[in-house]
Image (cartoon, grey):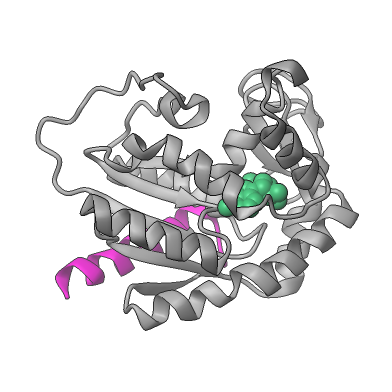
């Protein structure tokens, strides 16, 4: 199954709606949280899982990246502050992130479900999400925790190149573009994301260890954690994920 993936409602917020055709008979709504350290490949998996499951890819990082192209005057003070945290590789304050997610509550109600990528990232965010989902009667199907050794993560992050136009992601050795420095899809220049620079990577890894890793135990205690080895090609990892999800729904 391959679906159009319009994420306008999530990325832009407000009254904007997506142009995805509604599914008249969804098999089920997959409500998944993707966990794992920066560089583990959550974004790539979210795209592949969207193709398999139809659930919307909701990345909080994508909202901030989209906000960057607005002029400073068109951004709220909280959003300007958020972009500065992001530039340094630091976590944006919980209140800002939670306000953004609450403003997009309707996306959590999507008939096909959701794939939360990069949110929650702290225990406070996970607790707030839990309350929100309980109130809205939207139980999580599972929390997918992608695992990879640290050296592999560092190599993935340092070699990642992002298209300045369509935001497609490449890797200088694992997934090189056909022409060095040029996007295969739209021909725009490939860039090193500000937060993929070595200094920002170090700060992001520290933030992950301190703030996000505790979520593994948080979700383990709730019986929804599914751990997945993130080694191999993106397609292999996706197949592994699908087979784990089969076991979850069979249980
Ligand atoms: P990502 O694309 O998920 O790696 O996010 C990029 C950056 O956006 C992070 O390094 C943070 O600065 C910020 N960010 C994204 N999501 C969150 C979140 N849930 N909590 C705090 N900061 C976030």
Q: Residue at x 40, y 49 (%)?
A: 115
- Picture quarter with the N terminus: top left
Q: Quadrant of residue 209?
A: bottom right
Q: Is residue 204 something that shows in the picture?
A: yes
Is 76 contained in the magenta span? no
Q: What is the x, y in percent for residue 64?
A: 64, 36
The magenta segment is 231-251
Q: Residue at x 77, y 63 (%)?
A: 154
Q: What is the x, y in percent for residue 103?
A: 44, 35
Q: Is residue 172 something that shows in the picture?
A: no
Residue that lies at the very extreme toward the right in this rendered image: 199
* Residue 175 or residue 153, whichever sits in front: 153
Horizontal side, residue 32 vs residue 152: left or right:
left
Q: Quadrant of residue 203?
A: bottom right
Please determine whether, in this image, residue 45 is positioned above or below residue 16: below
Q: Quadrant of residue 134?
A: bottom left
Q: Residue at x 27, y 61 (%)?
A: 141
Q: What is the x, y in percent for residue 186?
A: 64, 18
Is 241 contained in the magenta span? yes
Q: What is the x, y in percent for residue 165?
A: 68, 21
């Amino acid at each position: 199954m391959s679906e159009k993936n319009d994420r306008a409602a999530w990325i832009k917020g407000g009254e904007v709606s997506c142009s995805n055709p509604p599914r008249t008979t969804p098999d089920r709504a997959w409500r998944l949280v993707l966990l794992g350290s920066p560089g583990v490949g959550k974004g790539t998996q979210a795209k592949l899982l969207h193709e398999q499951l139809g659930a919307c890819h909701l990345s909080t990082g994508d909202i901030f990246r989209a906000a960057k192209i607005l002029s400073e005057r068109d951004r709220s003070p909280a959003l300007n502050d958020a972009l500065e945290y992001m530039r340094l590789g630091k976590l944006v304050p919980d209140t800002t992130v939670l306000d953004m997610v609450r403003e997009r509550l309707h996306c959590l109600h999507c008939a096909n479900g959701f794939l939360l990528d990069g949110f929650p990232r702290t225990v406070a965010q996970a607790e707030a999400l839990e309350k929100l989902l309980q109130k809205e009667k939207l139980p999580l199907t599972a929390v997918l925790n992608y695992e990879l050794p640290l050296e592999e993560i560092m190599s993935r992050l340092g070699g990642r190149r992002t298209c300045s136009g369509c935001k497609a992601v490449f890797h200088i050795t694992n997934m090189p573009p056909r022409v060095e420095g040029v996007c295969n899809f739209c021909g725009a220049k490939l860039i090193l994301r500000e937060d993929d620079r070595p200094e920002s990577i170090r700060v992001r890894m520290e933030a992950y260890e301190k703030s996000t890793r505790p979520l593994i135990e948080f979700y383990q205690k709730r019986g929804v954690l599914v751990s997945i080895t993130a080694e191999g090609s993106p397609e292999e990892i996706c197949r592994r994920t699908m087979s784990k999800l089969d076991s979850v729904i069979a249980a």
